[in-house]
Image (spheres, rainbow, N blue to C red):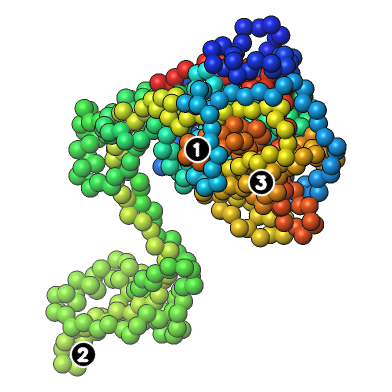
Amino acid sequence: MKRILIPAGGAILATGLLAAGLAGTATAASDVASDPMAKSAADAKAIAQFWADSNGAALKAAKQSNIWDNKDVAKLKSKGGYSADTKPGSASPIGQEKKPSTKTQNVNMPKTIGKVFFVNGKGEKKWCSATSIQSKYRNLVATAAHCVYDTQSNADTMTKWVFVPGYYQGKTPWGIYVGKQAFTHYDFDVYEDYDRDYAFVTVYNGIHLGGGKAKQVSKAEFEKYQGVKDAKDVEITRAEFRKCKLDPTSIQACWAKRGTNAEPTGPDFPGAEVTKVEVSAEKYKAARVGKGNGFKFGEPVTEIVTDSDAAKYKKLQEGNAEKYPATVKQDARGNWTITHYYTQQWYKPGTATKFYKTVFFIIEGYAKDAGRLGDNVGGQGVAWNQPTGKYVRVFGYPAAPHPDGNKPYTGITPKWCYGKTTKKLVGSAAKKIEEHVALKCAMTEGADGGPWLYKYSNSKRLGYVNGVTSTFNDQNGNDRVDYISSPYFDGETAAIYKAASNVWSGKIL
């Protein structure tokens, strides 16, 4: 899919509070690459249902992103420094547009962070970290560009892309927010330049899936229904099956699972069962003792019968000696006896015919609009062209092991790091990076896309996104991640943010 560039002088401009915050930003409209994600509300609803169905099974099955392998975890090198391309600028967090941030050292996790889930070009379910940020329509998510654009398969944007703030083990407390449009730097899209490894994604209003009521319907209604539905097979009696098949008004589908006949086999077949086969006295005497087909089955069985019963059996025997092979005798006292002889035959057991009805349900009221992202969890501010060497708090969901195999993180709960960013920007030849900012931090992959928050206020749980986690590095060579890095947020970053922050997305429902 060809990428769409926002033209210079186009209609997407900062207005209101954002206009004031973005004043002085470099005009770099040609740097903006925009990609559609879920193109319609119907598509978005289907994506949300994909992740939410079966109690969030797909969410639970997703693994952390894995674009970096152990050989990518290398040392960063100093590249000297970067000159800001415009004056420092910022956009205030949601709810703090006219209120200054306060400094604190106690750490409360921001309400805005969560995970972005997506399906990559290989069909794998993956996730990264991300945060809600300030925007005109309160519908914007910031993350790493490699969590949006599939560099490994050289495809376009990841499919089935959603943001779940406050995600925890399949739970979506504030709903699922489906990506509508992704904004990245043209250099990342075209050249995979990790100096531009950031993305801003507009999302539809959130959607809550769950809590609806099940209603039994006919098969025809079930097939037409576009919402969440379910069908269950219930075993019934033969009489119920007959009644169901004869009732033209039944809304159930009735069917039979035919049984299977027993099949001859050997005694060693798992689950094999033995039956007795009546044979003549001669065959019985010739049969061996033990376990196997044709071997003796117990001792002969003799019954005393009346004269008439003996006569009847002898007549049957004359007609079919193979079917009636018993020995008929009269003893010295005149009593008639019939002696039966048996050998073994082993069988794989058959199955009985079973009858079922399929009951169809639709889940009415299952989907509910959750409202706008920023109204529900707030949104961090955004800052660019800020000096390095300043304190930041970095949040994310690390999950991957260190290169040496040690795995201190689960990816279930968010973690944080705190410290000063490097004063000199750094690079990595392996990743074609020349202008990243680094921070001493041991978080591993899964934390990528997580926000670097400048001037973070613990009481408000808000700050300014001044970077996103991009790479993981080992500076001391002990096969442990000890530094992470982020692209430097400059005027070009602000231009991408500006293009995204004024775009409306709308509702799914």
* Residue at image point 33% right, 79% down: 341
* Relative to 74, 398 lies left or right: left
Q: Quadrant of the N terminus?
A: top right
* Residue at image point 54% right, 43% down: 104
* Residue at image point 77% right, 22% down: 85
Q: Establish if 338 lies above or below 425.
A: below
Number of marks in the rendered image? 3
Callout 1 secondary element: loop
Q: Amino acid at mark 1?
A: Arg
Quadrant location of residue 49?
A: top left
Q: Amino acid at mark 2?
A: Asp
Residue 117 appears in the figure:
no
Nearest to N terminus: mark 3 or mark 1: 3
Residue indicated by mark 1? 461
Callout 3 secondary element: strand
Locate residue 367, reporting x and y percent. Answer: 37, 28
In the foreground, 15 or 330 = 15
Residue indicated by mark 3? 419
Q: Residues at badges 1 and 2 in contact (C-beta under 8 Å)?
A: no
Quadrant location of residue 488?
A: top right
* Relative to 229, 429 lies left or right: right
Q: CA distance from mark 3 to mark 2?
A: 108 Å
Nearest to N terminus: mark 3 or mark 2: 2
Q: Few, some or many C-alpha atoms within 10 Å of disc 1 (few <14, some 14-19, many ≥20)?
A: some
Quadrant location of residue 123?
A: top right
Locate residue 34, reporting x and y percent. Answer: 66, 19
Locate residue 121, reporting x and y percent. Answer: 66, 34
Q: Few, some or many C-alpha atoms within 10 Å of disc 3 (few <14, some 14-19, many ≥20)?
A: some
Residue indicated by mark 2? 331
* Relative to 222, 288 lies left or right: right
